[in-house]
Amino acid sequence: MKIRAIRGATQLSVDSASEMTEAVTELLTQLFTKNNIGNQDLVSILFTATPDLKSEFPAAAARNLDLGGVPLICASELDVSGALERVVRVMVHAYSESERAEIKHIYLRGAVVLRPDLAK
């Protein structure tokens, strides 16, 4: 089995803890489901958030998915002028039988514009 990196992103409609929890839960649930990833397959998860998101850590929101044994870390995205606002990005490292070309990267809500080539 190989370790794969699976990317994704979502855009929050507002900066609130409840919206963070909802958006991150939706993103990770789809990413895990579409890539047939279970908790036992997870190695680690890296989250980034745009600097305008201050209400909650994405990793704290992800803990609702029973990820207690999975290392999670958050970082801030670069504050680039004109960048899409209220975006959480994720890179999941997981064991998978899938080939790299078979991995399904998940882009939801307004974040679809970040990678339309992957958000099919």
Image: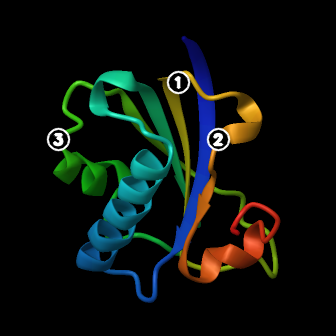
Height in image: 25 above or below 3? below
Residue depth check, mark 3 versus mark 1: number of the one nearer the observer: 1
Write down the residue under mark 3.
66
Write down the residue under mark 1.
96
Label 2 Cα neighbours within 10 Å, binned few <14 / some 14-19 / many ≥20: some
Q: Mark 2 is on which residue type?
A: Ile
Height in image: 31 above or below 93? below
Q: Earlier in the sequence, mark 3 or mark 1?
A: 3
Toward the bottom, the furthest residue is: 13
Quadrant in the picture for the C terminus: bottom right
**C-alpha separation, residue under disc 1 versus residue under disc 2:** 9 Å
Q: Mark on residue 103?
A: 2
Q: Earlier in the sequence, mark 1 or mark 2?
A: 1
Helix, strand or loop for disc 3: loop
In percent of width and height, residue 87 lies at: 57, 70
Q: Mark 3 is on which residue type?
A: Asp
Quadrant in the picture for the N terminus: top right
**C-alpha separation, residue under disc 2 versus residue under disc 3:** 23 Å
